[in-house]
Image: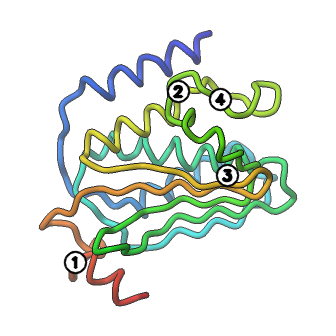
């Protein structure tokens, strides 16, 4: 009950706190989050790939919360695999940068995808995977507050991919060095 109340308070804060835009290194945050997850379960075998240089303009605290939830879900829903695979990266689609977190875990039936981002909506029962059903609702609100979109693709027992966009900003860069625009760098790689 305590965890549920904490999650509900976090969800409430996401919609109320003012945005504090700054340059945010999503790659660095993802590495930190994965490092924390590995500390909680050092015995886990997980291949994690994080694309370097994914820097955007946004609220650092809120974007950290979004990545903690998305990567935490990928970690959780791959927990029953002998060898988990989790990937965080980005691609350019129709001139827009689309970030993604992909895993090879439990996945879900796309017929129920409409429930994903609703508070207290769970596609897996609490006996299968623990959680409050607040995480993805929180992520969606964070992405929407930044003017972006979020959606998912999955197959039952074949993994899931969560995609999200963040609007382009003139200060968005390819990496901590600030060399070039992220869009240009991503297009050059594909």
Give the residue displayed 76% in from the left and 27% down from the top: 125
For label 3, the crowd category at 10 Å Cα-Cα, with few meaning under 14, some 14 to 19 and many 20 or more, is some
- Describe the element under mark 2 as helix, strand or loop: loop
Q: Which residue is mark 3?
A: 38
Depth check, front residue: 55 or 139: 139
Of the two numbered discs 3 and 4 on the same chain, state the one appearing first in sequence: 3
Q: Left or right: where does residue 174 sit relative to residue 151?
A: left
For label 1, the crowd category at 10 Å Cα-Cα, with few meaning under 14, some 14 to 19 and many 20 or more, is some
Give the residue displayed 65% in from the left and 28% down from the top: 131
Q: Nearer the viewer, mark 1 or mark 4?
A: 4
Depth check, front residue: 154 or 14: 154
For label 2, the crowd category at 10 Å Cα-Cα, with few meaning under 14, some 14 to 19 and many 20 or more, is many
CA distance for labels 3 and 2 = 23 Å
Question: Which quadrant of the rendered structure holds the N terminus?
Answer: top right
Q: Which residue is mark 2?
A: 134
Of the two numbered discs 1 and 3 on the same chain, state the one appearing first in sequence: 3
The label number, if any, that marks residue 122 in the structure image? 4
Give the image quarter of residue 111: top right
Q: Above or below — where is 69 with respect to 6?
A: below
């Amino acid at each position: 009950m305590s965890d549920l109340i904490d999650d509900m308070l976090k969800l409430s804060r996401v919609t109320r706190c003012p945005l504090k835009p700054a340059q945010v290194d999503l790659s660095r945050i993802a590495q930190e989050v994965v490092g924390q997850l590995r500390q909680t379960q050092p015995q886990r075998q997980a291949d994690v790939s994080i694309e370097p240089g994914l820097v955007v303009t946004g609220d650092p605290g809120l974007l950290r919360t979004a990545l903690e939830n998305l990567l935490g879900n990928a970690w959780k829903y791959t927990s029953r695999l002998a060898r988990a695979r989790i990937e965080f990266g980005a691609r350019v689609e129709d001139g827009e940068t689309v970030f993604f977190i992909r895993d090879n875990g439990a996945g879900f039936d796309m017929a129920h995808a409409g429930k994903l981002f609703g508070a207290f909506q769970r596609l897996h029962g609490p006996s299968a995977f623990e959680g409050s059903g607040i995480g993805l609702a929180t992520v969606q609100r964070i992405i929407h507050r930044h003017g972006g979109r979020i959606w998912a693709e999955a197959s039952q027992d074949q993994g899931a991919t969560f995609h999200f966009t963040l609007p382009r900003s003139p200060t968005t860069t390819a990496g901590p060095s600030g060399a070039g625009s992220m869009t240009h760098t991503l297009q050059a790689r594909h």
